[in-house]
Image (cartoon, rainbow, N blue to C red):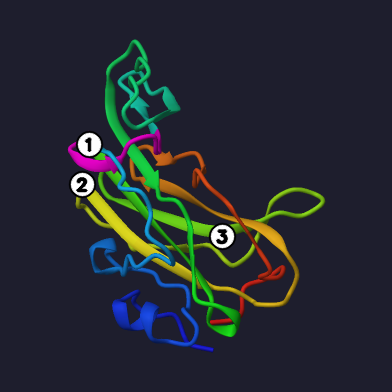
């Protein structure tokens, strides 16, 4: 099994298995789909292009120290912010999860983004693949995250192997953002999920 590595055209398109990739700018990720999809419409959210209808999570802290959070869909009206002005706020986005390859060479792929503004020191994010179970969602792999950065915008691509033949479950990724001065935001999941025979646990990288 491959060790964790940067997500790239080589890692995604040519390796027999795609290990969980972290610290990889999404601009470097491969976007080849198993079959052509209808062209998406895009809108601008916090200065960045996002597919219309995508769930956006916003969270922050007001001048009086109160934390807040809400979600809305790109292209729809953003909910009214708290009465007290926000001293810092972040918006997070997680793409739909896609599935590539077959058998021992199959893997899941997704992207995460976060943009922060206002009075904060640094930001980072973490992500994990979840799967269904009779008792509720469970982690399919471990949480993996980025290093902290003072950049206002971060965008990363991720992948994790399918443990082919291990049983059929429903899979979807989640993400959670962090900004110093605000703390951790709520967990946000992809808008879609996939029913695949990838077992209860991802293969060890």
Measured as percent of width and height from the top left, residue 27 is found at: 23, 63
Which of disc 1 and disc 2 is earlier in sequence?
1
Which residue is depicted at the point 37% across and 37% down? 182
Instruction: Tell me where residue 132 sits by quadrant.
Output: bottom right
- Range covered by the magenta-colored residues: 44-57
The crowding category of the residue bearing disc 2, from other C-alpha atoms within 10 Å (few below 14, some 14 to 19, many at least 20), is some
**In this picture, is 101 found above or below 113?**
below
Separation of residues labelled 3 and 2 (CA atoms): 25 Å
Image coordinates of residue 2 in percent, x first then y, are 48, 87
Residue farthest to the top?
A: 83
Tell me the quadrant of the picture where the N terminus can be found: bottom right
Task: Provide the secondary structure element on which disc 2 rests.
Answer: loop
Mark 3 highlights which residue? 129
Q: Which structural element holds mark 1? A: strand
In depth, the one of 96 and 136 nearer the eye is 96
Residue 119 seen in the figure = no
Mark closer to the chain start, 1 or 3: 1
Residue at (44%, 80%) from the top-left corner?
4
Q: Are the residues flagged by discs 1 and 3 in contact, CB closer than 8 Å?
A: no
- Whether the magenta-drawn stretch holds residue 45 is answered as yes
Q: Nearer the viewer, mark 1 or mark 3?
A: 3
Left or right? Give the position of 135 relative to 68: right
User: In the figure, 88 relative to 85: above or below?
Assistant: below
Q: Earlier in the sequence, mark 3 or mark 2?
A: 3
Q: Compute the Cα span from label 1 to label 3.
A: 28 Å
Quadrant in which residue 169 is drawn:
bottom right
Query: What is the number of the mark on residue 152?
Result: 2
- Please determine whether, in this image, residue 176 is positioned above or below residue 21: above
Dominant secondary structure of the residues highlighted in magenta in the image: strand
For residue 117, the mark is 1
How far is mark 2 from mark 1, CA to CA?
A: 7 Å
């Amino acid at each position: 099994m491959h060790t964790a590595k940067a997500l790239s055209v080589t890692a995604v398109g040519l390796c027999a298995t795609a290990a969980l990739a972290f610290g990889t700018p999404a601009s470097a990720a491969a976007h080849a789909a198993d079959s052509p999809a209808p062209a998406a419409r895009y809108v601008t959210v916090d200065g960045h292009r996002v597919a219309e209808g995508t769930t956006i999570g916003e969270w922050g802290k007001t001048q009086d120290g109160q934390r807040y959070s809400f979600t809305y869909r790109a292209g729809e009206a953003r909910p009214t912010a708290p009465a007290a002005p926000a001293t810092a706020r972040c918006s997070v986005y997680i793409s739909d999860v896609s599935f590539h390859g077959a058998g021992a060479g199959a893997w899941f792929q997704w992207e995460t983004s976060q943009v922060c503004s206002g009075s904060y020191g640094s930001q980072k994010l973490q992500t994990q693949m979840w799967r269904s179970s009779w008792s509720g969602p469970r982690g399919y792999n471990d949480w993996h995250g980025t290093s902290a950065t003072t950049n206002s915008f971060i965008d990363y691509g991720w992948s994790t192997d399918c443990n082919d033949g291990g049983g059929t479950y429903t899979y979807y990724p989640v993400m959670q953002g962090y900004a110093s001065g605000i703390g951790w935001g709520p967990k946000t999941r992809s808008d879609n999920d996939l029913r695949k025979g990838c077992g209860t646990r991802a293969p060890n990288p």
